[in-house]
Image (cartoon, helix red, strand yellow):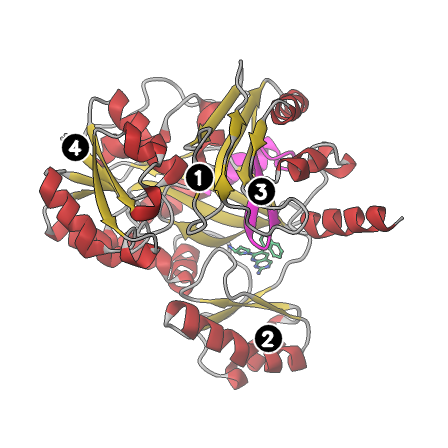
Amino acid sequence: MISKILIANRGEIALRIVRSARELGIKTVAVYSEADRQALHVLLADERVCIGPAKASESYLNIANILSAVDITRADAIHPGYGFLAENAKFAEICQAHGLIFIGPPPSIIRLMGDKNKARQTMKKAGLPILPGSDTVIEDLAIAKKIAAKIGFPVIIKAAAGGGGKGMRICRSSSQLEDQFPIAQGEAKAAFNDPSLYIEKYVSGARHIEIQIVGDRKGKVIAFGERECSVQRKYQKLIEETPSPFIDEKTRRKMMKEVEDAASKVGYQSLGTFEFLVDENRKFYFMEANARVQVEHPITEMVYGINLIKAQIRIASGEKFGFPFELVMRGHAIECRINAEDPATFVPSPGKIDFLVLPGGEGIRVDSAAYGGWVVPPDYDSLVAKIIAYAPNRDLAIRKMRAALEMTTIVGIKTNIPLHLDILSNTDFLAGRYNTQFMDGHMAAKAAEETL
Ligand code: MV4
């Protein structure tokens, strides 16, 4: 049983965890950096401990300081949220060695999923389809060229220690591969202290679709219906929706079943997300798995009427776990990520929020730690709110989202709300005709329109 959770995170996800813990009758400890003294998660948690200066490496990533905060407050569990230490296997191990419950997958699972090449090979063995590519990590260009020749161009180079698009390189010819391979190696070494790369066949015009899972401590894994995440820019998701307008019931069932089988085979526990690329023929290929709660988890919660954070906490506490009702997907949910940034240039726009009116009403959910008078610090990601619209069908959910965004007022900082409104009235988006290239096309069309 857990009686007090220390939340090793900040912002909306920290507040999200405070709320769920409180519902479960569990106390919370907020940790915060000097830049977050006035943050809402700090104000609303039961206790608070400052863990260092603004710089994340000295606060939210500072394991020694976080464990000191555990000792001071006698917390018995840690929730890492997303980002920061969430997928650090070493940290999960240290927590366990310290007698703490780490609210997430076991360290071995985090480590496996952190090695993207190993995860790919393991999931292939566990029965998931993957794209043609290298079986092992590739150390030198000659081998990379040989594999590329075998699978055919275009290919994509990925960092084994990467994920989320970091350090990826698309190569359309052997000479591009020659140029890009050493650059990618250098980048991977610099970013992850690991130059290991692997190669996959590159699929253009595909969709980025993911399956949420919950695994209990007895080896039972439940998969949920897909989240469509193809509206991204520079691998930063902007809008997510469920169900995907592209996935039919047969494909959905197949994906869910195959993920459940593969995840239980590897002993997956806690929350996780399996990312897939889905081509025009609705053939799906496993890409990577994320061993954490994701930013976009609320859309799944809305269509299933569940609370994934509560499920995650209850599983971690060793409770016999099950949902008290049949899991059925109902209606449609969309999430817009509201960032403090210039909607045209994407340059971050931190600073004081002079006045704030967030939307509400039936079917609207706002996950945010922002308030009027709060200063968005420049030190972290620029997510200030997630607005989630839930309605009986896609058209109604889109209308509801547009109405909600039009009634949102954020004065003092720039936000990407105008960009969201643009996308939500785009003909292709409205028809559900979009893939991972959508934002490139959308931005190009906007630029052309402005020069007319
Ligand atoms: C790919 C791909 C196409 N082919 N892999 C991006 C995030 C990371 N998890 C994997 N990603 C991709 N991997 C192969 N073999 C396309 C993406 C991708 C993407 C690529 C270009 C522009 C936008 C994109 C958005 C989502 C996924």
Foreground mark, 3 or 2?
3
Q: Which circle marks residue 148 in the picture?
A: 2
Foreground mark, 2 or 4?
4
Does mark 3's beta carbon lie closer than 8 Å to ligand 1?
Answer: no
- Does the CB distance between marks 4 and 3 fall below 8 Å? no
The amino acid on which the numbered mark 1 sits, given as a three-letter code, is Val
**Among the two numbered marks 2 and 4 on one chain, the one whose residue lies closer to the N terminus:** 4
Magenta stretch in the rendered image: 232-258
The amino acid on which the numbered mark 4 sits, given as a three-letter code, is Lys
- Does the CB distance between marks 3 and 2 fall below 8 Å? no
The amino acid on which the numbered mark 2 sits, given as a three-letter code, is Ala
Q: Residue furthest top?
A: 362
The amino acid on which the numbered mark 3 sits, given as a three-letter code, is Leu
Residue at figure coordinates x 45%, y 46% from the top left: 274
**Among the two numbered marks 4 and 1 on one chain, the one whose residue lies closer to the N terminus:** 4
Foreground mark, 4 or 1?
1
Q: Quadrant of ligand 1?
A: bottom right
Foreground mark, 1 or 3?
1
State the CA–CA distance, disc 2 to disc 4. 52 Å
